[in-house]
């Protein structure tokens, strides 16, 4: 199952993305050195290439939330069973997937400890000790950690593993208004990060009752679209109302000297974003990383055959390396002597580095270099005078082109269905998001899922957009416009 | 047990550091908002104030090791029992403290999974798949994660908890020489970080056979000294030799086309550094943070009573805030209206912010501000002209003063013992590091520990420094100079 981290003897992807996305995905993830399977069933190894991408995501988001007044903290990995049970809906939602620590070496425990599937319960137990007055609010904490959910379905690297990395934000506020504001501030931030950093556009809306977070008042979501027409939930932000506050007794003294329960939110994005990144942008040669999130943005490959050429080619490569680094680019010179230029081109294409710069003896003579864009594979000479300008411009072009293509795909794969027949037909033939008018009942939602595999991905904020007066599936009155899709 | 995160109604520390270090330590950690106890026995909550310090440590070390070619990765939290058992010494060293996952909801597992006490085994299982040739070496990986060791002794926040945050580096090399070099490159880096960032001096040397890492060839260590004369191990770096390579079959093809086992190292520092930071620098008013690691380096407190004064005082405070931020300081204005200046002074002193700047109406008139240094509590006026220069200079002074004081203490608390009588006497009356000539036997080491509570903290690199020809305790020939101490 495992691939050596830079085993490129079988470098190429042996299947086309358009023909077998699932197999293509697995090959790209393994062969590009993003990840590997581990000896623990369902758990993966994040190799440096994916971990560096995660660090970029972390740094971006961390800076933004800190600017908004959030702070990071770290809470225990373990949650006592009695705590996890306190909020019954929450418990029912998570326990099927909980891993339990039952025994410590030479010691039988009094109480089972859950390995955190999410940290609401242990955090809010502490919040009830810390929050006494309106002056303690808002409390805006975030954690970067890993969580464990014992999935029984087959493993899909980054998308379905039993342990994954994420951030979980948990805030407490004095009013519903403030909590609402927080939910959407964060959701917009997620959407902005996906767009600016990952070049992935998304749709935003509310989850249905059947799909909302266990224990929440409502869940807001951003949904992205994969090349096979399946949706991928990229981030969620929940208004928890006062549900947890009541169960964990998080009361505060209001400005008016009354007692009230706090209003809470929680929100998270995980390393599944890396899975989305792979699927949305990659091609038959491998990964394509948007420059803003690429651990290496530019790879310089010196090309020489005769000994006489080596010095001048290497010298020029190093000079360019220095210039690019100085203006803040993440650059690498690939000066390995035991690999051919062609081999290197293949490897860096597989790993998705946005821009390759080739420096050969003729380029030195002509005072130029050769640029190769990873997204379009365009190849062109750039004179030394315009080198830095062109490098900057090319980066912007690649970032923008990837976003444009993904946006175009997202726009073109939304369809209206007037009735269940059309709905099923679109789902089979087109995939994507199927917009339709829906009665809003859980029963209807479940039936659609059983019969078609599609679920409600989101309900747009503006319900006025209803197209029909009757539900697309049953004959009840339509209550909501809903976006259905099959999903990851 | 728990304290509200900024409950300062009982703000002050009620015990003197010099009279009861243990009680003082616990009060400082809780009242300064560094940490709290959690509902899981032995596990703590890292509050934002300590987590921000950990982020500073992480950022410093991460940058340094990346510059040396190391990369971050993430390996599973779980280790199958069969893997953990493979290296027998290692297993024996760690299993007494392992927490086991035995059951997943509705599923009985085939094999117990350990929650990582350290990641050698799971990482090296993967290394054997990845490393094939000398070209794959060195492999230089690091993880930032948490580990679980089910301590049975009583909890001491940051110093002894069942889960703690750390980094663990794991490298593989083609030769013993290279592994040796790595061990000491990292150890020196730890020592430099402690000195430059935390203002904590340390001694460096080798561990005895009895104290070395379970499964290592040798362990190098840096040891610091706490105010009660007890040593605190601050970081270790192990040459694992080929022990794990043989057990996990990590073989590579050498340049000469032979097969050989890799040479490995592992090394780590943890959040116990924060415990050391508290103990080394704090005073009876609370924490004292060295500027280089302080999440907030300067707190500006505007002071006004009449309404007429408010505007000019606040305006000036904001102007100074902007100037300090612009040159890279981490600054906060404490403009809370429901707290008195005196209350704020106490709180920021408790939290250890290195420099307080007071701005009152008279200071505005006189074109000056008042500086108060947290380390010496010196208070002096600074004219607006020399404001930035003086702020910069004061920061350097505080950092340097804290280091000087700690260095002085470390130097003055090392004693030579000629025989066991003198050894025990020094240990009781002085504490600190007792240097003595030792036979090097495990038996002797164990007896000393049983009889005095002291252990070998380190063996200096240069054995020529032997003072006596006979062991201080038994009558065998002395083999090594050893530094003994009681320790955390």
Image (tube, coloured by chain):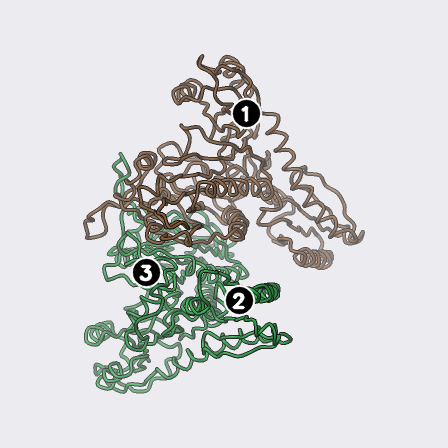
Chain colours: A brown, B green
Alpha carbon separation for disc pair 2 and 3: 69 Å
Dots 1, 2 in contact, CB < 8 A: no
Label 3 crowd (10 A; few <14 / some 14-19 / many >=20)? many
The foreground one among B18 and A194 is: B18
Mark sitting earlier along the chain (2/3): 3
Whole-percent x and y of residue B223? 37, 72
Tag 2 residue: B306
Q: Residue furthest right?
A: A366
Disc nearest the viewer among 1 and 2? 2
Residue behind mark 3: B215
Q: Give the foreground label among 2 and 3.
A: 2
How much space separates mark 1 and mark 2, taking CA atoms? 65 Å
* Residue shown at 38% from the left, 74% from the top: B283
Q: Can residue B327 be seen by looking at this rendering?
A: no
Camera-near label (1 vs 3) is 1
Place of residue B170 in the rendered image (x, y in percent of width and height, measured from the top left): 42, 57
Q: Which residue is drawn at 39% across and 57% down?
A: B47
- Are marks 1 and 2 in one subunit? no
Where's residue A375, x and y in %? Answer: 65, 38
Residue placed at 54% from the left, 71% from the top? B360
Q: In this view, does B389 lie to the left or right of B466?
A: right
Q: Mark 1 points at which residue?
A: A432
Measuring from the top left, give residue B260's x and y in whole percent. Answer: 43, 56
The answer for which chain carries disc 3 is: B
Q: Is residue A167 left or right of residue A82?
A: right
Decide: few, some or many residues near mark 1? Use Cα within 10 Å; few <14, some 14-19, many ≥20.
many
């Amino acid at each position: 199952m495992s691939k050596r981290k830079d085993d490129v003897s079988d470098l190429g992807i042996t299947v086309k993305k358009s023909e077998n996305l699932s197999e293509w995905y697995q090959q790209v993830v393994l062969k590009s050195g993003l990840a590997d399977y581990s000896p623990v069933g369902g758990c993966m190894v994040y190799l440096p290439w994916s971990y560096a991408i995660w660090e970029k995501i972390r740094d971006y988001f961390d800076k933004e939330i800190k600017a908004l007044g959030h702070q990071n903290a770290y809470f225990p990995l373990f949650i006592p069973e009695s705590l996890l049970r306190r909020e019954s809906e929450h418990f029912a939602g998570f326990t099927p997937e909980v891993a339990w620590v039952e025994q410590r070496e030479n010691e039988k425990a009094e109480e089972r400890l859950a390995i955190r599937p999410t940290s609401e319960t242990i955090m809010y137990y502490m919040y009830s000790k810390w929050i006494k007055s309106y002056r303690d609010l808002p409390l805006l904490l975030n954690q970067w950690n890993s969580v464990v959910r014992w999935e029984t379905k087959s493993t899909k690297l980054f998308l379905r593993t039993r342990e994954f990395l994420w951030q979980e934000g948990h805030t407490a506020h004095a009013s519903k208004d403030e909590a609402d504001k927080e939910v959407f501030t964060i959701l917009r931030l997620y959407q902005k990060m996906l767009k600016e950093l990952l070049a992935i556009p998304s749709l935003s809306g509310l989850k249905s009752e059947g799909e909302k977070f266990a224990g929440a008042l409502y869940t807001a979501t951003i949904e992205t679209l994969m090349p096979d027409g399946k949706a991928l939930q990229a981030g969620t932000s929940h208004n928890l109302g006062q549900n947890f506050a009541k169960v964990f007794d998080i009361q505060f003294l209001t400005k008016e000297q009354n007692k009230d329960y706090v209003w809470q939110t929680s929100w998270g994005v995980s390393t599944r974003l890396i899975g989305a990144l792979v699927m949305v942008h990659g091609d038959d040669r491998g990964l394509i990383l948007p420059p803003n999130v690429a651990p290496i943005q530019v790879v310089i490959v010196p090309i020489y055959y005769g000994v006489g050429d080596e010095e001048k080619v290497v010298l020029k490569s190093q000079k360019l390396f220095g210039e690019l680094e100085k203006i803040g680019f993440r650059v690498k010179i690939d000066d390995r002597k035991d690999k051919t230029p062609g081999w290197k081109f293949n490897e860096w294409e597989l790993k998705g580095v946005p821009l390759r710069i080739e420096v050969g003896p003729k380029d030195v003579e002509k005072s130029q270099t050769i640029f190769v864009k990873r997204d379009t594979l365009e190849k062109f000479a750039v004179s030394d005078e315009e080198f830095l300008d062109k490098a900057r411009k090319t980066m912007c072009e690649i970032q923008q082109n990837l976003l444009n293509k993904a946006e175009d795909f997202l726009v073109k794969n939304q369809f209206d269905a007037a009735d269940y027949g059309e709905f099923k037909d679109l789902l089979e033939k087109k995939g994507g998001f199927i917009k339709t008018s829906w009665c809003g009942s859980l029963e209807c939602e479940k039936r659609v899922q059983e019969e078609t595999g599609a679920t409600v991905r989101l309900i747009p904020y503006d319900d006025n957009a209803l197209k029909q007066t009757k539900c697309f599936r049953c004959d009840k009155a339509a209550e909501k416009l809903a976006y259905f899709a099959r999903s990851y």
